[in-house]
Image: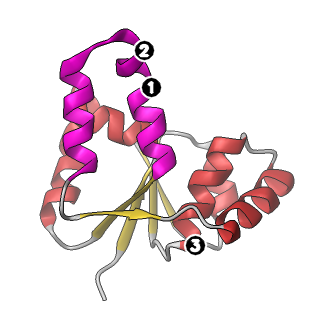
Amino acid sequence: MMPRLYLDSCIIIYYVEQRPDYFAPVDARINAGDSLVTVSDLCRLECLVHPMRAGDAAPLTAFERFFAADDLWITPSTSSVFKLATELRARHCLKTPDALHLAAAIEAGCDEFWTNDHRLDAAASGHLRTVIL
């Protein structure tokens, strides 16, 4: 079975905006074709808010194109995701969105969680490997 990696919203933003310090490693991993790239609808929400609020069509279109990719798996936000997020938030003092991202990745059976937030490393320990960019 192909390994799964979950992209936190910040990583998606860096990738879609092609930020120099982050684009290359994310692009290489996504295009290697050796893993199933996974996100949640929370990622879509967090990525689309700013360009939508600003009325900026170009980034909005770029994000929509990313989320519409055939090789992207959008994991459902089920009640079990919310239950686990509640536990993670309580145990590790996470913010609600961070707990939801991590819970979605765990429930989806992801092997890796890509983020730039070092605080999520401890909460992910024992569940999946974090890749901090």
* Part of the protein shown in magenta: 41-68
Residue 116, position as x, y percentages in the image: 48, 39
Q: Is 125 situated above or below 45?
A: below
Viewer-proximal residue, 56 or 34? Answer: 56
- Under tag 2, what secondary structure? helix
Mark number for residue 49? 1
Left or right: 122 in relation to 71: right
Residue 82, position as x, y percentages in the image: 71, 60
CA neighbours of label 2 inside 10 A, class few (<14), some (14 to 19), many (20+):
few
Let me know if residue 85 appears in the view.
Answer: yes
- Magenta-drawn stretch contains 73: no
Residue that mark 3 sits on: 107
Mark 1 and mark 2: span between their CA atoms? Answer: 6 Å
Residue type, label 2: Arg
Residue type, label 3: Glu
Disc with the residue nearer the chain's start (3 vs 1): 1
Question: Disc 1, disc 2: CB below 8 Å?
Answer: yes
Q: Which of marks 3 and 2 is in front?
A: 2
CA neighbours of label 3 inside 10 A, class few (<14), some (14 to 19), many (20+):
some
Q: Give the residue displayed 61% in from the left and 67% down from the top.
A: 78
Let me know if residue 18 appears in the view.
Answer: no
Left or right: 121 in relation to 75: right
Residue type, label 1: Val
Q: Give the residue displayed 71% in from the left and 43% down from the top.
A: 96
Residue that mark 2 sits on: 53
